[in-house]
Image (tube, rainbow, N blue to C red):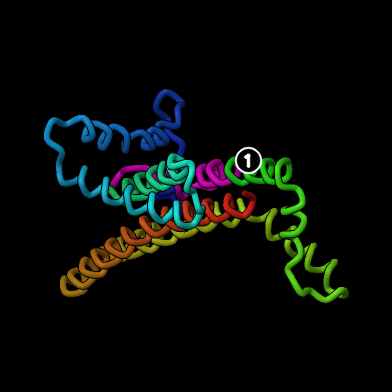
Amino acid sequence: MMNNLFSIFDPTTNFFNLSLNWMSMILGIIFFLPIFFWLVPSRIYYFYQKIIFTLHLEFKLLSNLNSFNGGTLLFISLFSLIFFNNILGLFPYIFTSTSHLIMSLTLALPFWLSFMIFGWLNNTNHMFIHLLPQNTPNLLMPFMVMIESISILIRPITLSVRLMANMIAGHLLITLMSKTGIKMSLLMVNFLILSQVLLLTLESAVAIIQAYVFSILSNLYSNEVN
């Protein structure tokens, strides 16, 4: 029996007093890493290689990385981590780590902090110029600097909250719909099952899109300070 609706996101367990639900983060490595060592590559391997190659070209185009070809590996790894955790969270009885702020903020804050430190130490003039858009009236200059400073400071929060909120919303909707099936007729239950299948398909697309958005925005933030 579920005490409240948000108990599905509770990461605590009573087994050996350990939060074993967080071990779901390594399931992606356990499931997908051996595929790369097969003698004959599978279709999943070719599909994932196609995704990596497409992301590499797009990240390279956004960052203008012509001299350092390995510069996109960081953002591809970030995409893979979020993507695997989002997809695995759609399976029953698997803990969705990306639905917690501690997980998403742990990913967003170090990236943003490293970009800021690099930018202010190496491109100080560029960072100051970035705080004030071109052709800004003299009267609005102090306000624009304040607004731009606030927008830069809240970037890790917006990144993490966006990922967390999108993952929570779909799971809550699926849970709410499943709890109403007990009191429905047979015809309505069939309609409910069809609706949940469509919603699960939508959640699969959201899981991919959110991983893509998180990695793309991180790449754009790094491009601003470089």
Helix or strand or loop: what does disc 1 sit on? helix
Residue 94, picture quadrant:
top left
Q: Residue furthest left?
A: 40
**Which x, y percent locates residue 155?**
62, 55
At 17% across and 70% down in the image, what residue appears? 190
Does any portion of residue 167 appear in the rendered image? no
**Which x, y percent locates residue 74?**
46, 41
**Which x, y percent locates residue 226?**
62, 49
- In this view, the residue in front, 82 or 212, is 212
Q: Is residue 155 left or right of residue 210?
A: right
Q: Is residue 100 magenta?
A: yes
Please report the bounds of the magenta region as a residue range.
Answer: 92-109
> What type is the residue that disc 1 sits on?
Ser
Q: Is residue 17 left or right of residue 150?
A: left
- In this view, the residue in front, 122 or 161, is 122
Q: Is residue 42 left or right of residue 200?
A: left
Classify 108 as above or below 179: above
- Which residue is under mark 1? 114
Classify 95 as above or below 154: above
Does any portion of residue 25 appear in the rendered image? yes
Residue 5, picture quadrant:
bottom left
**Which x, y percent locates residue 110?**
59, 40
At 38% across and 49% down in the image, what residue appears? 56
Residue 28, picture quadrant:
top left
Please name the predominant secondary structure of the magenta segment in the image.
Answer: helix
